[in-house]
Image: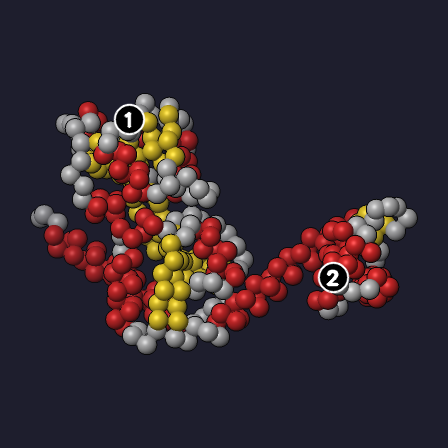
Amino acid sequence: MELRHLRYFVAVAEERNFTRAAERLHIAQPPLSRQIQQLEELLGVSLFERNVRPLRLTDTGRFFYTHALQLLAQTAELEAMTRRVSKIEHKVSVGFVGSTLYGMLPRIIRRFRAAHRHIEMTLHEMSTMDQIKALKEGRIDVGFGRIRHDDPAVRRVVLREERLVAALPLGHPLGEGRDMLSLADLVDETLIIFPKAPRPSFADQVLASFHDRGLRPGKIQEVREVQIAVGLVAAGEGVSVVPTSVVGMKRDDVTYMPFDDARIVSPIIMSMRMMDESAYLNDMLALIYALYEEERVDHLQRAPD
């Protein structure tokens, strides 16, 4: 069985007509019919019910169609990834979600560039789901996101679970006389979440944290990005839940409050192509773990006795 058999079969299955499928494939109809017949003889099964119009798949044909689509998709991904791997000896493209810029990512990029001056690195802001697509299409080589998403073509490494904090307008009653908040304290406030699209996203992680505790925010406002969310908080339009690293924005008109539940977190995930064993990826991972260890040691040294 060859890939062309799969492509021909999928075209006929989707068009439900040999003539239209042949036009779609830019081949004559008789050769297409012979190829499908050859495929059925090779498999020893009937894939189509030919006594009905339009054509209809048999139960076996429906099973074969599902797996044929998967195989063709994997083949396309393999072609794209192979072309990309052949070009990355001196170039690396990195996708990232905007909120990771407030954490360790800038240090990772600076240190990687210092250690690999011969490699040209380009950065592309994109959602986690867009990163998965871009990895499979060969448009980026590594991604830093926050959404847990299983895909057989992508390898994920959870670098850390980042604590989330509440962002309140300066002088908000919830920020007075308290060291910590609970999510329940926010349900009567306008909750500003981000990003508005595409979904799933960090916004869904925040909402899931409420729902997992049997809570439902009374009013929700969706915005495009974290900077807008924090700006609206500063203007008194509501409150938000943000990664701890966002505290580094250091706005005088926003108060950040930790939560009393250590399970309110968002992961930082590094994603790579499953079959990509490039040396620079191992170097990047080692560099990241070294930076996290430096951060841990520095935190211990600064902690009061």
Q: Nearer the viewer, mark 2 or mark 1?
A: 2
| Label 2 – label 1 distance at C-alpha | 60 Å
Q: Specify which label sits upstream in the sequence, 2 or 1.
A: 2
Judge left or right: residue 6 versus residue 217: right
Left or right position of 40 against 64: right
Relative to 52, say whether 138 is above or below: below
Q: Crowding near pointer 1: few (<14 within 10 Å), some, many (20+)?
A: few
Residue 131: image location, x then y, percent: 45, 55
Numbered badge on residue 66:
none
Q: Between 47 and 289, which is closer to the camera in this rendering?
A: 47
Look at mark 1 in the image and give the residue it sits on: 185
Residue 257 in view (yes/no): no
Return the residue at label 2. Answer: 25
Q: Position of residue 98 (x, y in %)?
A: 34, 50
Any part of residue 189 in sight: yes
Label 1: state its secondary structure.
helix
Q: On the rendered image, what quadrant is the N terminus found in?
A: bottom right
Dot 2 lies on which element? Answer: helix
| Residue at position x 82%, y 64% in the image | 28
Vertical position of residue 69 compared to residue 122: above or below: above
- Choose top left, top right, bottom left or bottom right for residue 280: bottom left
